[in-house]
Image (cartoon, grey):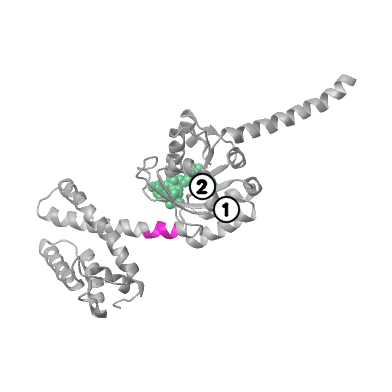
Amino acid sequence: MRAHRTSRPVQSVERARSQHMSEHENHERSTVSVIGLGQMGTRLAQAFLAAGYVTTVWNRTVAKADALVAQGAVRATTVEEAVAASPLIVVCLPDYKTVGDLLEPVAERLRGRALANLTSGTPEEAVRIADWAARHGADYLDGAAMSGTRLVGRPEGLFVFSGSPEAFTTHRTVLASLGNSVHLGADPALSPVYDTALFGLAWGALAGFYHAVALVGAAGVDPAAFAAVATGHMPFVTSLMADHARQIEDGRFPDDDGTVEVHAAAMEHLLHTSRVRGIGTDVPELIGNLLDRAAATGHGSSGIASVIETITKGERND
Ligand SMILES: NC(=O)c1ccc[n+]([C@@H]2O[C@H](COP(=O)([O-])OP(=O)(O)OC[C@H]3O[C@@H](n4cnc5c(N)ncnc54)[C@H](OP(=O)(O)O)[C@@H]3O)[C@@H](O)[C@H]2O)c1
C-alpha cells in the first residue's frame, strides 16, 4: 500500500517532468515553426528544411503536411503545439483575420518568442497585430514574400521584413534561408508598404513588357526571342532607378537621360506604332498622360525623373 501510495506521486512527477522535458526538448530541437502550409507556407517550410533547420509544421488540412513530414519536418497536431515548439513562429495564411483567429487562443504561448507574419495585408493591420503581439510579450516581424513561390530558398528571392530589430537580428540566419531577407526598419507598417510598392513596380514593368510583346508580335517576333533581348536591356533600366532616386532626393532633375518633352515625343511614336499595328494603347497612353501632365506643370525641359512631382502631388487630368 505504502509503495502504491508513494509510487503514484512519483509517477505523476515523472510524467510531469517527462512532459516538461519533451516540451523543453521539442523547443530546443525545433528552430522554426511554420503555420499555414498553402502554396507559400509549404515553400517556406521546404526552404527551412533545405537549410538544415529543424522545422515544425501545422496546417488546418492535416494531409498537406505529409510531404513535408516525409522530408523531415516535425508535425504539430495543434496550433498551440506548433507555437510551443520553436523560438521563431512563421505564419502564412490568407489574411490577418485568419491569423488573429488562429493565434488569439494561444496568445500566451507566444510570450518570449518571435512571430514572423508573412501573410499579405495592409499597414494598419500590421500595426494592429504588432501591438497585439507586444501585449502578449512576443517580438513581431511583419514580412512579405516578393518573388512569388518560385524563388523561395534562393539568394535572389526577396523577402522584406519590418518590426522588432531584435527579432530580426536573433533570427537573421534562419530567415536568410528563405532568400535575400531584408529588414526595412522598426515600423511594422513598412513591410506592407514596400509589398504594395514593389508589386506596383513589378506590374509597371510587366505591363510595359506585355505591351512590347504585343507590338513586336504584330511584327512577327516570337515572345521568347523578344524576352531574350529585353532582359539584356534591364540593367540600363535598373541603373536609371539608382540615379533617379538620387535626383529625387536632391530635388534636381538634370536632362542627362532626356527631357520630359523628348520622352513625350517618343511616347507619341509608340502610341502611333501601336495604333498602326492594331494593338491596345492603354500602356503608352498612361505614360504619355503622365509626361504631358509633368510638362504642363513646367517640367517640359526637366529630366524625366521630374514626373515624381506630378505623382507625389496626386495631380490628375480629370
Ligand atoms: N502564393 C504566392 O505566390 C504568394 C506570394 C506572395 C505572398 N503570398 C501571400 O501568402 C499568403 C498565403 O498565400 P498562399 O498562396 O500560400 O495561399 P493558399 O495556397 O491559398 O493557402 C492558404 C493557407 O491558409 C490556410 N487557411 C485558410 N483559411 C484558414 C483558416 N480559417 N484556418 C486555418 N488555416 C486556414 C489553408 O489551410 P488549408 O490547407 O486547410 O486550406 C492554407 O494552408 C497570402 O497572404 C498571400 O497573399 C503568396
Q: Mostly what secondary structure, the magenta segment? A: helix
| Residue 174 picture location, percent across and down | 48, 40
Which residue is the site of mark 1?
100
Can residue 141 be found in the magenta stretch? no
Q: Tell which circle, 2 or 1, labels the residue nearer the N-terminal end.
A: 1
| Residue 155 picture location, percent across and down | 36, 42
How far is the residue under mark 2 from the one under mark 1? 25 Å
| Residue 146 picture location, percent across and down | 38, 51
Point 27% across, 80% down: residue: 297
Report the front residue among 183 and 231.
Answer: 183
| Residue 27 picture location, percent across and down | 61, 36
Callout 1 amino acid: Gly
Residue 79's image quarter?
top right
Which residue is the site of mark 2?
169
Q: Is mark 1 within 8 Å of ligand 1?
A: no
Q: Is 180 placed above or below 273 here?
A: above
Point 64% across, 45% down: residue: 109
The number of discs equals: 2
Report the front residue among 202 and 222.
Answer: 202
Query: In what element is the residue under mark 1?
Result: helix
Residue 99 located left or right of residue 278 = right
Residue 243 located left or right of residue 127 = left
Q: Which residues are magenta?
A: 192-197
State which quarter of the image contains the N terminus.
Answer: top right
State which quarter of the image contains the C terminus.
Answer: bottom left
